Image (tube, rainbow, N blue to C red):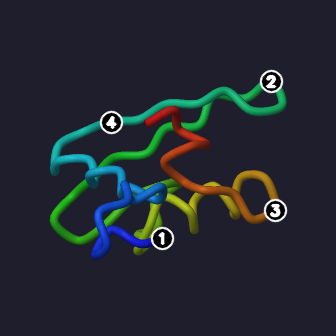
């Protein structure tokens, strides 16, 4: 069933974090910090288009970015 036929949408989107938000996550003994800017997600001096791209850079595996950062 889909949302168009009255069933709830099981893949509800997590709202994107607002510009100015700072997210932190410890992974393998290191604290990783990302900042949300008008240009995108800034991590280690580089701009990424999504939290998932940053999570993949940190872990080397595909993760849901919002889930990785606890959103």
Question: Residue 15, how many percent across, how many down?
Answer: 26, 51
Query: Is residue 46 rendered to the left or right of residue 20?
Result: right
Q: Is residue 13 above or below residue 28?
A: below
Question: Residue 50, how many percent across, how many down?
Answer: 44, 67
Label 4 packing within 10 angstroms: few (<14), some (14-19), many (20+): some
71 or 29, nearer to the observer: 71
10 or 6, nearer to the observer: 6
Q: Secondary structure at mark 2?
A: loop
Tags 1 and 3 in contact by the CB under 8 Å rule? Answer: no
Tell me the number on the disc at residue 61.
Answer: 3
Q: Which label lies toward us, 1 or 4?
A: 1
- Mark 1 vs mark 3, CA separation in Å: 31 Å
Query: Is residue 43 rendered to the left or right of residue 3?
Result: right
* Residue drawn 33% across the image and 68% down it: 3
- Mark earlier in primary sequence (1, 4): 1
* Residue drawn 83% across the image and 31% down it: 28
């Amino acid at each position: 069933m889909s949302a168009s036929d009255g069933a709830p949408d099981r893949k509800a989107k997590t709202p994107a974090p607002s510009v100015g938000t700072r997210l932190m996550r410890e992974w393998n003994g290191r604290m990783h910090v990302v900042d949300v800017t008008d240009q995108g997600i800034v991590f280690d001096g580089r701009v990424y288009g999504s939290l998932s791209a940053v999570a993949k850079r940190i872990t080397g595996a595909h993760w849901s970015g919002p889930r990785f950062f606890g959103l």
